[in-house]
Image (cartoon, grey):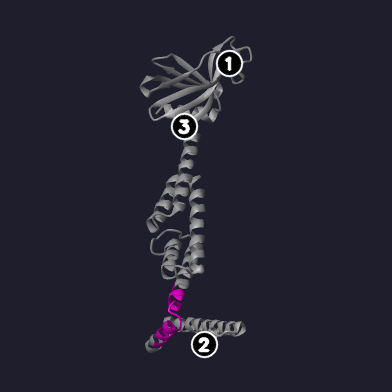
Amino acid sequence: MLLAAQQAADPAVRADAASALATVAAGSSAAAATLAAVAERDADEKVRKTAAETADKLDPGARRRLAAAAWVQKGQEALKAGRLVAPPGDCALAHALKALELDPQGSEAQRFHEQAMAVIRSEVRATAKSDIPGAERLLEQASALEPGRPEFEEMRTAIAEAKQAEYRRTHVFRLVHKHSSKSTLGGIIAIGDGRTTGCRGMFELLDDGFRFNTEKSEDSRQDHVEFRSAQIKKVQIRDGGDQLHIETTVKGNWDFYGNSADLRRILQTLSR
């Protein structure tokens, strides 16, 4: 009768029929959800079987949605416990993927998967600032669970940027190189003071030696040099820690000035 009413000429009758069918469908879905829960939890095997068969007739997707919701719940628990991507069988991302497998179009499964990915992305970025190997392990574990996710490229970029920042912090230093002195006074940090000439530039530690490149010079001299470890005779800290003195076998002696902590780091590396 309802189906016939849907084809009636009167628009009001068709609207009433559509509303009635929607009510029936909603009732069927609710009943199916209840039966699906019974099929999962009842102690009696026959009751579970009958409930499952009836639920599937009323709403074929009811049991899958219920199972997906259970995986989302497990995933939320893993998320709270900090198990983002490990162990592989009991972590937030693995549970999110299981929920999506059971209910690909389900909004709850999709939302949790997005939540898990957002937390993983944030954790990779935060970890990369202080523990680059740890961030790489986290990304590797996530990639193993769900290869090809576009978010992973963004995370790889964040790790690469962290590596570059770490390299600059530990290998690249802004120093002053003294060219000549017009008196025995200091003042090299303020080159161009009438007492000294020199240049500011970037000092970079290499795997086997160092290089220095002038950025700004107070005279016509531009230093762009590179020395290997075998060419370095002696490295010393002088003037109370403000001067790095390097003696080489090929181009004489080089005096650099800068942050005392940076000079000590260079001394330690070149003295190995």
Residue 174 point in image, percent of width and height: 53, 27
Quadrant housing residue 44: bottom left
Label 1 element class? loop
Q: Which residue does the numbered mark 3 point to in the structure image?
A: 171
The stretch in magenta equals 50-67
Q: Which residue does the numbered mark 1 point to in the structure image?
A: 218
Please state which amino acid type lies under the numbered disc 1: Glu
Please state which amino acid type lies under the numbered disc 3: His
Q: Crowding near pointer 3: few (<14 within 10 Å), some, many (20+)?
A: some
Residue 180 point in image, percent of width and height: 54, 12
Q: Crowding near pointer 1: few (<14 within 10 Å), some, many (20+)?
A: some
Q: Are marks 3 and 2 in contact (CB under 8 Å)?
A: no
Label 2 element class? helix
Please state which amino acid type lies under the numbered disc 2: Ala
> Does the magenta portion include 114?
no
Label 3 element class? helix
Nearer to us: label 1 or label 3: 1
Residue lying farthest to the front in this orientation: 9
Q: Nearer the viewer, residue 157 or 194?
A: 157
Instruction: Kindly tell me whether residue 263 is visible in this rendering.
Output: yes
Q: Write the residue at 49% across / 65% down.
A: 110
